[in-house]
Image (cartoon, rainbow, N blue to C red):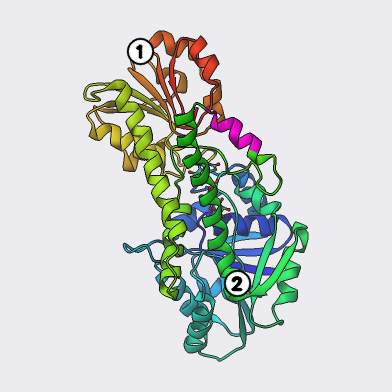
Amino acid sequence: MKLSIIGTGYVGLVTGTCFAEVGHEVTCVDNDEAKVKMLQAGGIPIYEPGLEELVRKHTATGRLRFTSSTADGVENSEVVFIAVPTPPLPDGSVDLSFIERVARDIAGAMTSYKIVVDKSTVPVKTGEKVAETIKRYSKTKVEFDVVSNPEFLREGFAVEDLMRPDRVVIGVSSQRPVAAMREIYEPFDAPIVVTDINSAELIKHASNSFLALKISYINALSVVCEMTGANVMEVAQGMGMDKRIGRRFLDPSLGFGGSCFPKDLSAFVKIAEQTGYDFGLLKEVQRINAAQMDRFMKKISDTLWVLKEKRIGVLGLAFKQNTDDVRMSPALEVCQRLLKEGATLRVHDPKAMEKAKALLPPSERVEYVADMNAVAEGCDALVIATEWDEFKRLDLERARREMTHPILFDGRNLYDVAEMEALGFIYKSIGR
Ligand code: UGA
């Protein structure tokens, strides 16, 4: 089918590319001319495993093209997907101005029946507003349908999640767009849930909040494990074997971050508040997440005492593995807090160093180190802040030799406690 995607951020670019991969003809639209030029030339603005190859493949097959003209995208497609940012406002609610703007642009460009699909994460009832806006600004008064089709991809696994989704959610207010939506997703071979628009929009916020809740649950449990001498990894394993619970998203950490969970939680709390419901459970999820970072920092200062003039190696800057995204990254927060306490940092990330430099500029006190195994040199302590697989294969013998003191704070539980102690490290992790 002929599809257009407005917005080439994470969701838009990966969605458009995967649609091309399964045979659709896709026009990706972005108002950032420089980005469009970069994409047209085969460049990729983000690091996402498998994406670059697919973009190259389908710019060559002609099934994927990029333009900065919304009118071009709308004219050349039967279905228009909106995938623009919905950033948080200072009070935690969602800034819907990009969505509203795109709805007006689409309205101005429509000359025949279109299905307008919202893929961005939006508060419940946004679909109704989008429909009202298109109706108001449409010059030709052509017919259209608005559909909600939330995205559940994880950064770092985006292509994999999109090509093999657990489910596809389609929210509609009439039956007319259903057949086309089914046709778009038929090649992905996933169960399709067809529901009303408000339910579809809620499924997205409810899913992300529930996953964040799962992480805060295990993080809260990690505190109880530390107090009682239990091992949170064993507890997670034992709990996760119950199919009703499941092991995934039960990895204790220094807290969740990224551009989705923190923002979506705040938005969902706000949405509930506007309906008159105080979603205290989710506020507690936020509180536990903030406390987890505080506890981790306290472990560092309890062990090292004064941080001023201490040299600390930090492994990881991205908010999680397999991405170069540093937005709301707990790893960056660790760095910033250590700097505030007067420490000097040697930092490394396999993919996120360039992006991190904007938020954590290199200086006399922040040295970016290209080789992960060289980070420990001359350090009083090492911190693992992101769960990159390569950090499980550090040259620990070398680290111990080159550090002034072999102390490792592991915010992601990548190593075994007994093995680390046998290697001569003072090893502090989460919930063990
Ligand atoms: C999340 C959801 O997982 C996706 O389903 C959703 O589509 C996406 O938000 C979105 O709304 O766009 P993402 O933010 O890319 O995806 O990353 P996650 O893999 O969910 O990780 C989020 C944070 O939780 C990271 O900081 C990660 O390190 C942390 N985490 C994750 C844990 O601390 N423990 C875990 O067990 C899992």
In the rendered image, which quarter contains the N terminus? Answer: bottom right
Query: Where is 4 relative to 295, above or below?
Result: below
Residue placed furthest toward the bottom: 141
Residue at left 78%, top 58%?
189
At label 2, which amino acid type do we have? Ser
| Residue topped by disc 1 | 405
- Tell which of 54 and 143 is nearer to you: 143
Left or right: where 169 falls relative to 350: right
Residue 134, how many percent across, how many down? Answer: 51, 83
| Residue topped by disc 2 | 199
Query: Where is 365 relative to 136, above or below?
Result: above
Residue 42, how many percent across, how many down? Answer: 56, 49
- Tell which of 95 and 279 is nearer to you: 279
Q: CA distance from mark 1 to mark 2?
A: 55 Å
Residue placed furthest toward the front: 228
Residue 40, how many percent across, how many down? Answer: 54, 55
| Residues in magenta, as a range | 230-238
Q: Residues within 10 Å of mark 1 (few under 14, many from 20)?
A: some
At label 1, which amino acid type do we have? His
Residue 186, how many percent across, how many down? Answer: 77, 63
